[in-house]
Structure formats: structure tokens, C-alpha cells
Amino acid sequence: MHHRKDRAKHTISIIHNEQGVALIYALVVMAVIVALALALLYGVGQVSMMTGSYRDQEDCYVQALTLSEAINTQLTTVTGSGIYDAAKSYMPDSDSDSTEESIQFTAESLGDGYGRAVIRFQNGVEAMNESHDWESKHLSQQYLDLTVEVFGKRGGKESVTTRYRFYRELDDDDMEYTLTTNRYTGVEAAYTCEYVSSTGADTDYFIVYDPATYEVKEERLKLKNETVTMELAERWAGAVQDGGIERISIMDEAGEVQSIDAAVQIKLTRQRKLLGFGEGAESEYKGKELKFQKINTR
């Protein structure tokens, strides 16, 4: 009888011990689950914060790019107002080798959902990359770096910088064209050229004159029977061109005209005229239109 009571007590003790162990296991499991839940909540919070920050940063970039493109349209297609006036007033002369201090101003309210925008001007000087034999009709040593910087409401910040070439646009009346060739006498000599623009039905061309007598040497400058147009001349950019073998008339020492076969070469060059320079005079270039040309965006 006593033996049975002892066994019963022993069994109850084991059951209590197992219940205690199970309770400990349950507490440990609950603690792990709670820790995991807290870690998950923290992770979600961090991802949410990062997502919000990323979206704010992305919004700032989109706004900066959009505003920069809008300014580009005004700066390159509209003259005499708005951002063009501000930029032109800031820039030195197009052919100047000077620089100005950078300036910036805050854009007016852009509407709901937009951050604060700052526009910055910074000019620079770049040597004109051109051949003396074929000078550009775009007179310029200046460029403008225009930066649009947007500050978001959540601390984001992005900027877009566009570089523009600032130039004074000349026309053909401001340029001098010269032809150097052996075509007319067999000996290389320089001749004056006049450019005649296209009339619609007819293509553009060059008339060649003797600079001393202003006698027309060639009514339409040609190379291998092809009329020399401005497009072709721009492609040559002042380089010597081979005209092949031509039958030309020359005057010999006795004053008699003879026909000979000659290896003809031509070289068409272009230089800017120096207009209006002198004491008390202002360059006529000053009256030419000033423009901005987009180079790149970064």
C-alpha cells in the first residue's frame, strides 16, 4: 500500500517537472516570437523611412530636371524677356575673356507638392576652337553653367546643371570670303568672293572677282563641275581641295594667250570682318543677336 502511494507521488512529481519545463519552453518561444516581431516592426519602420526619403530625393530630381528643361526652352527660343534677360544681363560680352562671380536666386512658388528651388548662374571662358582659314559666324568665348537645385520638404536635395554656349550670331555680311587658286593664271593667287544665298528655285553659290579690277573671274565657283555651296564650303572648312586636271588659258611672256593643262587646286577661306573699330567707334558686332545654345546636361 505504501509502495503504491510512493509511486503515485513520484508520478505526480514527474508531471509537475514536465509542466515546468514546458512552461519554460513556452516562455522562451514567446520571447523569441516577441523579439522577432519587434525586429520586423523596426525593419518595416526603417524601410518606410528609407522609402519616404528615396521618394523625396526622386521628387527633387524630377522637379529639378523639369524646371531645367522649362528654363532651357525659354533661354534658347525666346529673347527679350524672363530668364533670357536675366542670363544675358549677367553674362560678359560673348567674345570676352573675363568671368563674373556666380549669382543665385530663389524661384517663385512652384505650386503644391514642389520643394524650394534655387537657380544659379556661373559663367566661364573657353577659347574659340576654330581654324583661322574658316572662322565661325558664331562669335563666342563664353559659356554659361545654369544650375537648378531643389530642396524637398523631407530633407531631400537634388540639382541639375546645364551648360550653354553664349554667342553673338553674325551673318554673311560680317564675313569675308577669299579664294586662293591657280585656276585663272596657272600661278596661285588670291581672289575676292561674294556669297549669294539661295533664292528658293536656285541654289546658293559664290561669285569670284579679281580684287584689283573687280572683274568677274567666275560667275559660279565650281569644283569638278559641281557648284560650291555654303554646305560644301562648311564641310571643307578652309582646307585645300583638289580640282583635278583642267584646261586653262594663260598669258605667256610674249603677251600671247596659250591653253595648258594644269593640276588645279582651290582653297576657300572665311574670316570675320573687323567692323566699326577705331577711336570713339563701337563695334557693329554689338548690334548682332545674342543667343544661348545648349551643350549638355549633367
Image (cartoon, helix red, strand yellow):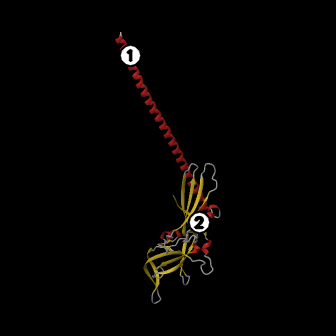
The residue under the point 47% across, 33% down is 34
Q: Residues within 10 Å of mark 2 (few under 14, many from 20)?
A: many
Residue 41 horizontal/vertical position (percent): 50, 38
Q: Is residue 137 left or right of residue 259?
A: right
Please provide percent x and percent y for residue 100.
57, 67
Q: Residue 246's image quarter?
A: bottom left
Given residues 284 and 157, the one toward you in this image is 157
Q: Amino acid at mark 1?
A: Lys
Q: Nearer the viewer, residue 239 or 41?
A: 41
Amino acid type of the residue that numbered disc 2 sits on in the rendered structure: Lys
263 lies above or below 5: below
115 versus 16 height, above or below: below
Give percent across and percent down for residue 249: 47, 82
Q: Is residue 132 above or below residue 156?
A: below
Q: In the current view of this chain or complex, which residue is farthest to the bottom?
A: 254
Residue furthest left as drawn? 3
What residue does disc 1 label?
A: 9
- Quadrant in which the N terminus is drawn: top left
Decide which of 183, 41 is in the foreground and name it. Answer: 41
Tell me: 17 left or right of 122: left
Q: CA distance from mark 1 to mark 2?
A: 104 Å
Q: How many marks?
A: 2
In the picture, the disc for residue 291 is 2
Q: What residue appears at the point 48 percent right and 75 percent down from the top-left corner?
A: 267
**x, y percentage for residue 259?**
45, 82
- In what element is the residue under mark 1? helix
Q: Secondary structure at mark 2?
A: strand
Q: Are marks 1 and 2 in contact (CB under 8 Å)?
A: no
Extreme residue in the right direction: 81
